[in-house]
Amino acid sequence: MTSGGTDPWAVAVADVNHDDAPDLLVINSQGLPDAGTLVIFLNDGSGNFTKGTVHRRGRKNPRDLCTGDSNGDGNTDVAVASTRTADILMLFGNGDDTWNRREVAIPVGSAPRTVACVDVDGDGKTDVVFGRANRDDIDIIQTAN
């Protein structure tokens, strides 16, 4: 199975289209100077995957991604850590393999490398925990109530 791009860095599993089958999300760095891609592979329910939309979101050097429901609408959202742009890009799902155009790039000061999506404050919305290169700490982006 191809990664749908060049230089895959991370894979996440989530049901992006509400069919109760786990879909695959892959970020590819595409090599500089090109922007990275997010590729969705839709599961037909029998473990067969078809390539969905290739999303070019203008982030360079995406390194990690995680999924959850950050805005509480019941759809899968994605957080992508991008080292070159030094931000966490939040993509808000529409309940299929597309994303709301209202994306948010959150500057984090230096190269984020890892992300984990979890509800750390119990408000029912997914928060993002991340680590950065050459740092000895982690940070949390909490979603608004």
Image: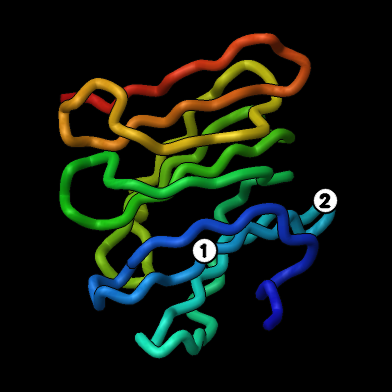
- Amino acid carrying mark 2 in the image: Pro
**Quarter where residue 120 is shown:** top left
**Residue occupying image coordinates x 16% and y 50%:** 73
Q: Position of residue 55 (x, y in %)?
A: 53, 65
Decide: few, some or many residues near mark 1? Use Cα within 10 Å; few <14, some 14-19, many ≥20. Answer: many
Furthest residue toward right: 32
Secondary structure found at label 2 = loop
What separation in Å lies between label 2 and label 1 (alpha carbons)? 22 Å
Q: Is residue 143 left or right of residue 8?
A: left
The secondary structure type at the circle numbered 1 is strand
Q: Quadrant of residue 34?
A: bottom right
Say left or right for 40 vs 145.
right
- Count of marks placed on residues: 2
Answer above or below: position of 44 versus 23.
below
User: Which mark's residue is nearer the viewer, 2 or 1?
Assistant: 1
Q: Which residue is mark 2?
A: 33
Q: Nearer the viewer, residue 101 or 106?
A: 106
Q: Residue at x 33, y 76 (%)?
A: 21
Residue 65 - label: none
The residue located at (44%, 79%) in the rendering is 42
Type of amino acid at the residue the image marks with label 1: Leu
- Are there few (<14), some (14-19), or many (20+) residues within 10 Å of tag 2? few
Q: How is the image coloured?
A: rainbow
Q: Residue 69's spot in the image, x, y percent?
A: 27, 46
Where residue 25 is drawn, which disc sits there?
1
Identify the image quadrant of the N terminus.
Answer: bottom right
Residue 89 vertical position relative to residue 99 in the rendered view, above or below: above
